[in-house]
Image (cartoon, helix red, strand yellow):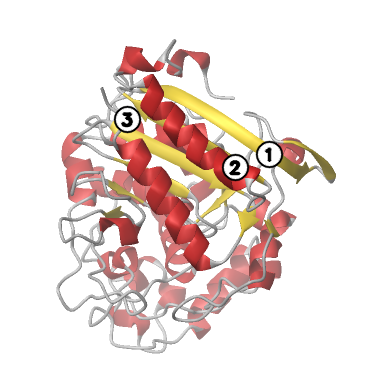
Amino acid sequence: MLNPELIASKPEDVGIDSERLEAVFARARRDLDDGVLPSAQVAVARNGKLAGMRTFGSAVQGGEGRPATDETLYSIFSSTKAVVGVAVWLLLEEGLLKLDERVAEIIPEFGTNGKEVVSVEQVLLHTSGFPYAPLRPEFWGDRQTLLEAFGRWRLNWEPGTRYEYHPTSAHWVLSEIINRRTGVDFREFIRKRVTEPMGLNELFAGLPPEHDARVAEVRWVSEAVEPPGGWGEVTPEAVLRFNGTEARRSGLPGAGGIASAAELAMFYQPLINGGQTVDGRQVLKPETIAFGTTVRTEGRHVDPVWKIPANRGLSMVVAGDDGNAFMRGFGRTCSPVAFGHGGAGGQIAWGDPETGISVGYCTNGFTDWLTVGRRVTAISSLAGSCAI
């Protein structure tokens, strides 16, 4: 559970309208009432504190079907990328890393098959050219096998010339950069330097075994319909691998995070409040956050699936002012400078520096991509307009 000191006594204490917040909860519950999802959890925060949270439905947890509660944890899939990204921001802030460095200078095992030219910035922007470089799930927790895989990986295009989402490969590289430049395992670095300073003790990159029984097992609740652009790595079979210990223990840096919706929403509060927590701890410098959330993808970097500009910061998506924010997971009511990173299955995670609102939404139910898109847009739009 979230630290009680981070929970507002009532929504109005942090500038959130109770009736509008209830509308967010009602929309999240609708999918449960209609039988679309088995369980879901949603949270909205502002001014450094959680304004409200609700959990609906039931899920298999620890091998047993039972009601989901506010203590239930969820696989957050690619929302993990933002957490790893913030860890990399800290390396940049402290002079331990530069964007123009070649990855191969940091990880010599990576410097093969033309990858010698790949820069740190390109990896963070998904322009590095190896979107589907493989690492089988049974090796997710095996660092030596990962390093050997780096040597085999090949480029699909010249780095920097185009954008294509790297579901897991880029963040394996980022995790190893953290390992090398800090001398600390990336999971421990995230815990000690990112989540614990934020007061978030249950936003996990690498889940301890004692919490396994709290995690809602992922399941398909409708026929799996292939999305535009094809399945890529996120196949129906691959999704179910996230119920296994390989994903939970490894902290799979592109997709393996575990959290509650409250922790997801609260992760963005320091990031949209100058890097500071509500009790005055400075997690990041304001200029570091501005640096990390500046759109760096260029006009030629168009998402090949959705045919819109990628609008990428450093391991972060930025809403933008081109009318496509809803297609990036932000709904229709946030400001252009809102930033975050959603996850497969419709996980929602973003914060808006202009309104001070942040939102987290988690579900263990996988449905067709069109249903997911409509739900993400609806919940994000309602959450984005909750301020008094």
Residue denoted by label 3: 386
Residue at 69 percent across and 60 percent down: it is 221
Q: Amino acid at mark 2?
A: Ala
- Of 3 and 192, which appears nearest the observer? 3
Residue 175 at what x, y percent from top left? Answer: 46, 57
Local packing at callout 3 (Cα closer than 10 Å; few below 14, some 14-19, many 20+) is many
Q: Which circle's residue, 3 or 1, is located before the other in the chain?
A: 1
Residue denoted by label 1: 57
Residue 11 at what x, y percent from top left? Answer: 39, 17
- Of 246 and 369, which appears nearest the observer? 369
Residue at 71 percent across and 68 percent down: it is 138
Image quarter hosting the C terminus: top left
Residue at 51 percent across and 28 percent down: it is 53
Residue denoted by label 2: 40
Q: Which circle's residue, 3 or 2, is located before the other in the chain?
A: 2
Q: Is residue 271 visible?
A: yes
Q: In the rendered image of this protein, does residue 347 appear above or below residue 16?
A: below
Instruction: Determine contact: label 2, label 1, CB under 8 Å.
Output: yes
Question: Which quadrant of the view contains residue 146?
Answer: bottom right
